[in-house]
Amino acid sequence: MPDAIPTPIPHDEPVPNDLICSICMSIPSDVPVITPCHHLFCKDCLQQALSIQELCPVDRCRVRTTQVKDLKEGTLPWRLWANTRVKCANHDSGCLWTGGIADFRSHAEICGKKRDNQYSDSSVLEELRQYKQLNVSLQDTIRKQEDEINALRIQLQENNGGADIESLGLFDGSYVYDREDVVRLSQLISIGLEQKPDIIDSNKIFNAVQARFKDWEMGYDDNPTYYDTDMKMLMATCNASAEWFSMKQKKRIEYMLDRVFSCDD
C-alpha cells in the first residue's frame, strides 16, 4: 500500500472501478501495473500479493511476476489514470493543490505542508525530551522522599530506645487510636518494626491506620496542627515494617504513603 494516498476530487466524475487497486482499494499514486488478464494494481500491492500466491487477486487467473507490466504511457487506460484529478495527501493540513494523479508524486516531494508536518515531528521529539527531564525530576523527588523516610525511622528508633509497648502505654488492647494518637500508633509499630509482638492483631492496626489516613485525606478543620507531619511519620513507619501487614495491605500502605508525601508538591 502506498505511503501517501491521493484523494480524488469529490465533485469530479467518480473514479472508474477499473482504475482502483482491488488490494488497497485506492487509486495507484504511481504508474499502475497491469496483469495479462487486464487488471490494474499498485505495483507494490501486486508484488506482495504474488509473493504469496501467483494468482490475480481479482479473477484468480495464474499470473507470474514476469508477466506483469507497467501501464503503457499514451494508451487509453493510462490517460484515464493520469487525468484523474486528486487532492494532495496533506490537504487536511491545509495544502490546496489539486491536479492529475500523474503529477501527484512529484508534488508530494515538494509539498510545503509535508515540511510543516516534519516540523511537527520535531515538536514531538521536543515534548519527549521534556518528559525525560520530568522523569529525572520525579526520580529526584522519590530519592528525597526515601531519605525523609529513613530519617523518620532513625528518629523513631532514637526516641523509643529499647522500651516495650506496655511500659510506654502504647497498647491497651482496645485498638482505639484517634487523630491525637497518631504519634503513639507510629511508636507502637516502630518498636516491633522487624518483628510484630504476638499480642498485636495486624488487621486491627491496619484498620486504625486507614481510618487516620481517611481523616487526613478529608482535611477536616479540626485535624491536629501537626497532622501532616504525624501522618508522614505513621505511613513511613508502616511502610518500613517487616511483618505487620499482608501483601494486599502493604499495597494500600504504599498508596497512602505516596499520598501523604505528595501533598507538599
Image (spheres, helix red, strand yellow):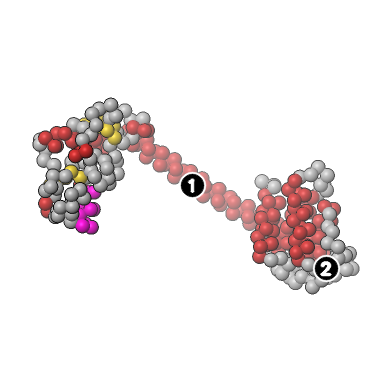
Residue furthest toward the front? 59
Q: Amino acid at mark 1?
A: Arg
Q: Which residue is mark 1?
A: 129
Q: For this rendering, which residue is in front, 16 or 144?
A: 16
Q: Amino acid at mark 2?
A: Gly
Please tell me how crowded label 1 is: few (under 14), some (14-19), or many (20+) other residues with Cα within 10 Å: few
- Please identify the dominant SS of the magenta region: helix
Question: Is residue 46 magenta-colored?
Answer: yes
Residue ID at (36%, 30%): 94
For residue 111, side relative to residue 63 (left or right): right
For residue 91, side relative to residue 19 (left or right): right
Classify mark 2: helix, strand or loop. loop
Classify mark 1: helix, strand or loop. helix
In the image, residue 161 above or below residue 221: below
Residue ID at (59%, 54%): 139
Among the 4 quarters of the image, the one containing residue 248? bottom right
Please report the bounds of the magenta region as a residue range.
44-53
Residue 156 location (% of width, % of height): 79, 62
Q: Which mark is residue 161?
A: 2
Residue ID at (18%, 49%): 59
